[in-house]
Image (cartoon, rainbow, N blue to C red):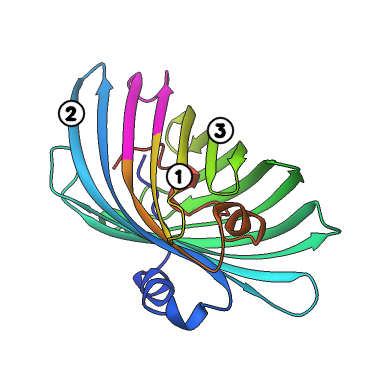
Amino acid sequence: MNTKLFATAALIAAAVSAPAFAQNIGSVGAAVNYSDVNTRLGGNDGTSAVLDGSVAIPLAGAWTVTANGDVSISDNDLSDETVASGAVHLTTKLGDTVRVGGFTALSRPSNDTLWAVGAEAQKYLGNVTLTGLAAYGQSNDLDADLYTVRGEARYFVSDNFRLNAGAGWSRIDTNINADLWDVNAGGEYKFANTGWSTFAKYTHAESKDLAKLNSDAVRVGFRYTFGGSLKDRDRAGADLATASDLFAFGVR
């Protein structure tokens, strides 16, 4: 399912304003996403280009606003759409090791209107970051309720080399009810004395309810980080879940 959330302006503002946010921390990036989707009715595959941006803006005290989003440009057997997505997060730190808060997100893929709200938390343990979220959303076109629970572990081999793995469950309640599961693994490496990094991510998703859906996706790309290292970016709240992380399952 392709749930890409929020307005194009959120991503453009984050990307274009990166120099202005130099005192904060965030990133802009570009990637290629290849997806192979199979069901009992048949299968298709396709490649998409993805642009993304994120920025974390400290507020008073321990509070932070994070804006992130992406634009997916597709012209293949899976999709011929250009869809913008994004989310806005409000979080606070409890001491030095816990971040908690909530987010909201919105999108219009395939002339549908999708929105979601949720709660999230991060726990920092030395070189490890544990993340979790729960969200509720609605698809107006499908008249569907959407639920998801997701978790991820990130291990920093060094401040500029990250490995990560995660898993998620989602449920769609409409004329039919369907459960979907996914797992993912990836990493990012930032080159020394530069803001540039390269990253990759693999996602596998499946559902026994939706025509026995089975999908695999690989994304590779480059990213420019402003304001610090990959670990600094993570701990500042600039790497909170994107809107397309919620229900997309790598299918683009």
Amino acid carrying label 2: it is: Asn
Extent of the magenta region? 202-219
Q: Dot 2: what SS?
A: strand
Q: Would you call the spot at circle 3 few (<14 residues within 10 Å), some (14-19), or many (20 or more)?
A: some
Q: Nearer the viewer, mark 2 or mark 3?
A: 3
Q: Residue at x 49, y 54 (%)?
A: 242
Mark 3, residue position: 166
Quadrant of the drawing holding the N terminus: top left
Q: CA distance from mark 2 to mark 3?
A: 25 Å
Crowd tier of the residue under label 2, counting other residues whose Cα lies within 10 Å: few below 14, some 14–19, many 20 or above: few
For residue 70, above or below residue 123:
below
Residue beneath disc 1: 189
Q: Mark 1: which secondary structure?
A: strand
Q: Main secondary structure of the magenta part?
A: strand
The amino acid type, in three-letter code, at marker 1 is: Tyr
- Residue drawn at 32 percent across, 21 percent down: 211
The numbered dot on residue 152 is none
Up/down of 196 relative to 200, above or below: below
Residue 193 seen:
yes
Q: Mark 1 or mark 2: which comes first in sequence?
A: 2
Q: Which x, y percent locates residue 48?
A: 22, 46
Magenta-colored stretch includes residue 205: yes
Instruction: Check the image and report above or below for 88 versus 156.
Output: below
Residue drawn at x 58%, y 74% is 24
Q: Can you give x and y, in whole percent of width and height, for residue 29 in the image?
A: 36, 58
Of the numbered discs 1 and 3, the one sitting upstream in the chain is 3
Determine which residue is flagged by label 2: 44
What kind of residue is marked 3? Answer: Gly
